[in-house]
Image (cartoon, grey):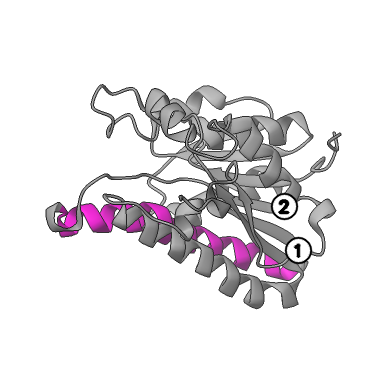
Amino acid sequence: MYGTEEVKGKFAIVTGAASGIGRAITELLVARGAKVVAEDIDPAVESLAGPNVVPLVADISADGSAEKAVALAIERFSQLDLLVNNAGIIINKLVVDMSRADWERIIDANVTGAFLHSRETMKAMIPRRSGAIVNVASYASYFAFPTIAAYTASKAALAQLTRTLALEAIEHGIRVNAVGSGDVLTNILNTVAADGNGVAALAAHGESAPMGRAADPKEIAEVVLFLASARASFMVGSVVMADGGMSVKVDS
């Protein structure tokens, strides 16, 4: 059903690669023939090291991290074909209880990091007049519920960054798109869930989607690889929803 060599011979950077969606994307890219710089603030990303994966421990929102990731890709692979801006964090607080530091931490991780990596990646891709950037957005790019103001603001900004960058990039032969992810069984809520079990919390919340469940990270990785591949050659500035129907649901 899926292409088995859709990214064969391609070279990529994946942020937030240590676990969850980012790890699934990295593993799928490698399985289908790509080589990856796997970047994460979590040193656990080093466990991915191998012939086709070069780990990089870095804070994606820090000055110099994007430059380091791109330089590493060029050093090891001689070129850069794909960027997946996947890294993201969440906080569950009412606006009245949220500090400026809380707000800025979410915006920095979810938007600023993507901006910095996209900017540096574009500089490497423009001379070759080819490449693809895929951002991992969310149904929260469009919809909200109480306590996730910083997260929804960051994901809405990421969707708009996708659209604007797509218009700037396509004249250079570079496509920019995003996947609007729903609830996915990852550890993103481990620091938010009362019992520390973020996967269980996401599984429970995913039951409210029309599909009745949360996604496996591999399901989101498949959409990312499609957008990164030539199979999506006519897609520019799209935010493809992969959320189990959450974004089309209207509660009665």
Residue 227's disc number: 2
Left or right: 148 as drawn, with respect to 50: left
Position of 149 compared to 6: left or right?
A: left
Please tell me whether residue 185 is drawn above or below residue 22 in the rendered image.
above
Expressed as whole percent of the image width and height from the top left, the position of residue 149 reads 30, 57
Could you tell which of marks 1 and 2 lies nearer the N-terminus? 2
| x 70%, y 38%: residue | 222
In the picture of the structure, the residue carrying the numbered disc 1 is 235
76, 162: nearer the viewer? 162
- Label 1 residue SS: loop
Task: Mark 1 and mark 2 in contact? Answer it, CB < 8 Å.
Answer: yes
Q: Secondary structure at mark 2?
A: helix
Residues in magenta?
Answer: 98-127
The kind of residue tagged 2 is: Leu
Q: Is residue 203 magenta?
A: no
Which amino acid does the dot numbered 1 rest on? Met
Residue sitting farthest toward the front: 252
Q: Residue at x 46, y 27 (%)?
A: 203
